[in-house]
Amino acid sequence: MSNGGIAVDSSGALYASTGNGIFDDTADLVPPMAPKNDFGESFVKLDPSALTVTDYYTPSQNAAWTLHDEDLSSSGVTVLPDGHGPTGTRISSSARTSRDTCGSSTGH
């Protein structure tokens, strides 16, 4: 997350981004079960009391970005203001390659 800290939404949920690494939650479980609980190149939503993953977003290009050291979030995560409708909490970030990435916590 470079110099960016952990972001917090209006309900107290924590959001962070991860850099290069393995993504192996292939069973699509939330919270993930060890040993398949690595979230490289991902945004993760964490329960503030247990610090467990409650939601995530991982781009389909995560393996290629890791291979070429193109970190998903070199600027940290920004939680955008709550909107109307069933969109969930929206987050935004910038990658090392100047790519902007947005995600929503309505599901992974």
Image: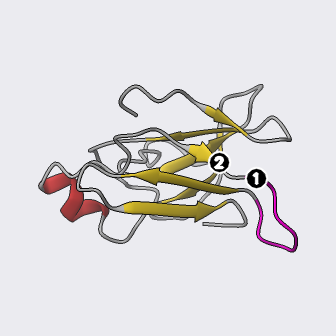
Instruction: Answer with left or right where residue 13 lies relative to residue 15.
Output: right
Front position in the image: 66 or 103 = 103
**Residue 57: image location, x then y, percent:** 53, 60
**Residue 56: image location, x then y, percent:** 57, 55
Question: Is 86 a magenta residue?
Answer: yes
**Magenta residue span:** 81-88
**Residue 44: image location, x then y, percent:** 56, 46
Pick the quarter of the image with the C terminus.
bottom right
Front position in the image: 55 or 7 = 7
Front position in the image: 53 or 90 = 90
**Residue 47: image location, x then y, percent:** 73, 36
Q: Residue at 41% of width from left, 61% of height from top?
A: 100
Q: Which residue bears the numbered disc 1?
A: 81
Instruction: Answer with left or right where residue 36 lies relative to residue 79.
Output: left
Q: Which residue bears the numbered disc 2?
A: 31
Pick the quarter of the image with the N terminus.
top left
Q: Earlier in the sequence, mark 1 or mark 2?
A: 2
Position of residue 65 relative to residue 19, above or below, is below
- For mark 2, does the 10 Å Cα neighbourhood hold few (<14), some (14 to 19), or many (20 or more) residues? some
Disc nearest the viewer among 1 and 2: 1
Q: Residue at 60% of width from left, 58% of height from top?
A: 29
